[in-house]
Image: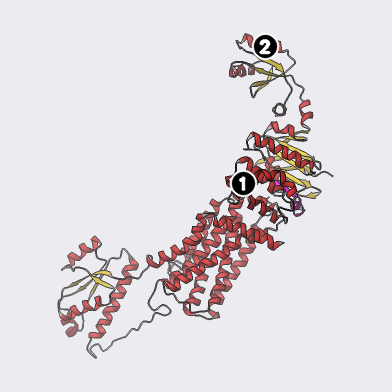
Amino acid sequence: MLLKIFWAFVKKESFHILRDTRTLFILFGMPIALVLIFGYTVTNEFKDASIAVIDEAQDDLSQSLVEHLTASGHFRLIDMPPNKAGIEAAFRAGTVKFAVVIPPQFERRFYRDKQASVQLIADATEPNYATTLTSYASQMIGAFQNEHAEQGALPYQLDIETRMLYNPQLEGAYNFIPGVVALILMLICAMMTSLTIAKEKETGTMDLLLVSPLPPILIIIGKVTPYVLLAFVDALIVFVMGVYIFNVPILGNLGVLLGLCLLYLLVALALGVLISTRSTTQQTAMMTSMFTLLMPTMLLSGFLFPIASMPSFLQYLSTIIPARYFIDIEKAVMLKDAGWEAIYWPSLILVIMLLVLLVAARRNFKVIYK
Amino acid sequence: MSSIVVDRVSKSYDAVEAVKESQFSVEKGELFGLIGPDGAGKSTLFKMMTTLLIPDTGDILIEGFHTVREYKKIRKIIGYMPGRFSLYQDLSVEENLQFFATIFGTTIQANYHLIEEIYTQIEPFRKRRAGKLSGGMKQKLALCCALIHEPKVLFLDEPTTGVDAVSRAEFWDMLKRLKSKGITIIVSTPYMDEASLCERIALIQTGEILRIDSPENIIHGFDKPLFAVSAQNFYQLLQDLRTQPFTERVEAFGEFLHLTTKEAISTEKIEAFLNFKGHREIEIHPTTATIEDVFLDLI
């Protein structure tokens, strides 16, 4: 009997979803759009960066340094202004974001004085881009130096060997795929469910459901089940796009990953139900979800900005953001194939959050109004 | 045992007292009307009777069950049609009915005899989405959904508001037939003309019940002299009568003015006065009160 009622709810809710193009778009257009946007536009990677080189030395060594820099394929030389004044104009015009200045007598200083300098100039109006270019160029110049230094010429040389663990190519996708999954699950489970429940309140159908003999918990479960399934499908879509388009590996156990996805999804769901118990219109549900869920999930979860570099107040605030723990779990399982000891703590926190939220939602869900 | 007992029930929203010490009861199988203007407290009373709202003071029993302590039992035996159309607009007629049948643990087939008369009228549109139905159709569908689980008591909160005159008349016919099946029906309406279609009515205003009786008794209880008056210049007529010392109240009732006088007065005397005021085509005769006259007299 209860099962039959449950299915009636699932069927009804599916009709609501399928007959509303806006909902359909949010459910299926949004995840794909987010992955593509983050994958192709929001990225610190660079290819073919236009750089200028002012070679004031014009000797063999300076020529080969320029060749070395351009050979990588990451830098594209643009017409070189002959002097520093020209380069400043180019920076102001925005045609150049990065320049390398090789001083006169570069070769002589390098071999004879063992003391040559190269100046790097970057347009820091885009700080991330400037930092990335500078560090990349520094690395290449360092390599160049090693290549050309005579054996024993630099007696006290400290070799720095850098290894980027778990993401050797520093691919942005390794960060944003887990982030997008966390965001999408929050969006669908929390925002969509709070909206759909608030809608029933707003149109008065919730009164009809409450006046029926159904236990309220069944009403809620019946309503949210289709969203759980859809959110899960969305998570799979994002993972598949990550693996096949952006080559993000899933090194760990897929079952564990999906299982913990489900846990996070339930947390999001409980949040959505809690919000809906406090809002009587779709508008308030929407606004509450936006400001208490989506923004923090984007900004405070470590998805867009590293938590370690936040002011301590925001770091504390980020400890109550479920997405933070889920992203940790995802990265541990997907990129590191980390064992149970790495994921049990964030998982435990999510379980505790889930329990607290369920109790709060239960207390707030009014069967009869005061 | 009465089907509905409302015992000294009060309810306030913040500072506003929506229902004050209301008290009435409805017998089994009775068609009972709550008559009053918008904001009189009708919907609040309905929400308390249908277990959606807890009264501040007082008790309500539905079929012997207490609305707060035994709300679960009540929810099995009542049908509720809220004040505004509250079905799923994006589901079809059939899907809505099917859904409500299922959540009440029954099927359309099992109780088809209850809704047959009403449902056959909307059946040609059963594939149409509820949001695309006309006002009268929506109301019929909502009634079907409220009836599908064979309730013992039917609560209809302003079912005819926003519905055309023909559909309203049809709707009241349906209610009479339902009543003959032994279902207790309590209906609220702001339309005074619908009051006479109920067996008993309660007149309600700003949360207070003014009078409870059969419509006939309520009308007979009105003992003041009442005249229907009309003349060519209707507006001037209203103005002139309002300012007269013999006038207690004048209200427009369709093509006539209803004039209540403070004491007995002959039609000739009024006519003479109106002639003196320069009115033409004067028509005047004593008339019997309507529910609206009584209502306006009470407030």
Of marks 1 and 2, which one's residue comes earlier in the chain? Answer: 1
Which of the image's four quarters has the N terminus of chain A?
bottom right
Q: Position of residue A98 (x, y in %)?
A: 26, 68
Q: Is mark 2 on a helix, strand or loop?
A: helix
Q: Which numbered dot is residue B125?
A: 1
**Could you tell whether B68 is left or right of A257 in the image?**
right
Measured along the vertical axis of the image, is residue B27 above or below residue A227? above
10 Å crowding of disc 2: few (<14), some (14-19), many (20+): some
Question: Is any part of residue B55 visible from this angle?
Answer: no
Which residue is tagged 2? B271
Q: Disc 1 is attached to a residue of which chain?
A: B
| Front position in the image: B163 or B121 | B121
Q: Is residue B221 left or right of residue B228?
A: right
In the displayed image of the protein, which residue is found farthest to the right?
A: B1
Residue A271, magenta (yes or no): no
Q: Position of residue B268 (x, y in %)?
A: 70, 10
